[in-house]
Image: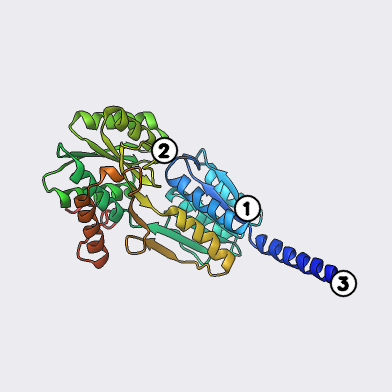
């Protein structure tokens, strides 16, 4: 009986310990326009946070922004409800998060794709131009027409960074390649307009493009469908989107927002979180390109070898990829 009581007592202590550990932080996230199932940027974050929840047993509060006025309200609500860490998704939340972080100095705040700074803020950015350089090479190497396209979401410097890197990579692989560029719009609705994305893509195909890279959030769904319908190729973004239309998706420019989101919550749980700015590129495995069973047959050994050689050269500093954000000019 005593042995049973000791065993039961030990089990109770273990359970209490686990429960305390699983409840030691209260994390929250505010997804941006397009929603957490946009098959791209937001969904990558969602996947990272779901991994965190699965591994730790810690649930997180969430909110999906559907209009601009909700951003600041949602961030403040999360902080007011006692969140230890509030994670904002997307550059558009930058100012709102910085403002609320100043009101709640004892809480932690982080933003993916933002640049806010403060004693309780962590900003996580990516070197999108480096990853886009690689898929630009893939596009140019695969193209039979010598014409490739780019469809951006909202016309902002961040998306111009994608486009600039893509052009540089395409020109690196084929100096004579032509790159057609279109932006979907100038308002946040540009992130979730598949119809417009499809129209722009069809227009680029009409001009000779046979590969189109979309950096447009949910709008990219329309780009990929148009490519499938036309028997052309498309390149995904942020998450690995190769599975969406196997045989159509040439590759995806991976931006590891899932890892950034997972590490943010996990660092808070471990007590290793720091208020600082971080920028993740090829060297940090923060960006890259995707090869898997869905596109393996589309990428020849020669293509892969050339792209991988460029990836290593960029990491080594032998190839310098110009960042559009540094001077708002795309140097070739």
In the displayed orientation, state which residue is furthest to the left: 176
Note whether residue 15 is visible: yes
Tell us which disc is closer to us: 2 or 1. Answer: 1
Q: Residue at x 82, y 71 (%)?
A: 6
Q: Secondary structure at mark 2?
A: helix
Residue 290 % position (x, y): 34, 50
Q: Quadrant of residue 229?
A: top left
- Tell me, for residue 59, which label it has, or none: 1
Q: Secondary structure at mark 3?
A: helix
- Tell me, for residue 2, which label it has, or none: 3
Crowding near pointer 2: few (<14 within 10 Å), some, many (20+)? many
- Mark closer to the chain start, 3 or 2: 3
CA–CA distance in space, label 3 to label 2: 62 Å
Q: Residue at x 49, y 44 (%)?
A: 32
Q: Quadrant of residue 243?
A: top left
In the displayed orientation, state which residue is furthest to the right: 1
Crowding near pointer 1: few (<14 within 10 Å), some, many (20+)? some
Residue 194 % position (x, y): 39, 32
Task: Please determine whether, in this image, residue 28 is positioned above or below residue 222.
Answer: below
- Mark closer to the chain start, 3 or 1: 3
CA–CA distance in space, label 3 to label 1: 37 Å
User: What residue is shown with label 2?
Assistant: 218
- Tell me, for residue 321, which label it has, or none: none
Q: Residue at x 56, y 64 (%)?
A: 268
* Apparent side of residue 327 relative to residue 281 in the rendered image (left or right): left
Residue 176 % position (x, y): 11, 45
Residue 211 % position (x, y): 24, 38
Q: Residue at x 40, y 58 (%)?
A: 125
Q: Quadrant of residue 306?
A: bottom left
């Amino acid at each position: 009986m005593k042995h049973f009581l000791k065993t039961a007592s030990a089990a109770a202590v273990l359970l209490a310990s686990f429960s305390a550990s699983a409840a030691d932080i209260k994390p929250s996230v505010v997804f941006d326009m397009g929603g957490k199932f946009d098959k791209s940027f937001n969904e990558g974050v969602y996947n990272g946070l779901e991994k965190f929840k699965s591994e730790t047993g810690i649930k997180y509060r969430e909110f999906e922004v559907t209009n601009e006025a909700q951003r600041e309200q949602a961030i403040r609500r999360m902080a007011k409800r006692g969140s230890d860490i509030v994670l904002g998704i997307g550059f558009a939340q930058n100012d709102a998060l910085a403002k609320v972080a100043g009101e709640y100095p004892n809480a932690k705040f982080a933003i993916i794709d933002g640049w806010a700074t403060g004693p309780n803020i962590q900003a996580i950015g990516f070197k999108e131009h480096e990853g886009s350089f690689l898929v630009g090479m893939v596009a140019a190497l695969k193209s039979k027409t010598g014409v490739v396209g780019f469809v951006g979401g909202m016309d902002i410097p961040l998306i111009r960074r994608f486009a600039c890197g893509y052009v540089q990579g395409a020109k690196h692989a084929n100096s004579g390649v032509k790159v057609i560029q279109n932006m979907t719009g100038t308002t946040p609705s540009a992130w979730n307009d598949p119809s417009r994305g499809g129209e722009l893509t069809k227009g680029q195909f009409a001009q000779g493009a046979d590969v189109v890279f979309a950096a447009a959030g949910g709008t990219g769904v329309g780009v990929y469908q148009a490519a499938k319908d036309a028997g052309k190729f498309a390149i995904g973004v942020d998450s690995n989107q190769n599975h969406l239309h196997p045989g159509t998706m040439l590759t995806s420019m991976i931006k590891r927002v899932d890892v950034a989101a997972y590490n943010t919550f996990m660092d808070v749980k471990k007590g290793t979180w720091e208020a600082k700015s971080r920028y993740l590129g090829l060297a940090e495995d923060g960006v890259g390109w995707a090869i898997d069973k869905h596109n393996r047959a589309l990428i020849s050994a020669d293509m892969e070898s050339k792209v991988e050689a460029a990836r290593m050269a960029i990491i080594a500093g032998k190839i310098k990829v110009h960042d559009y954000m540094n001077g708002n000019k795309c140097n070739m």
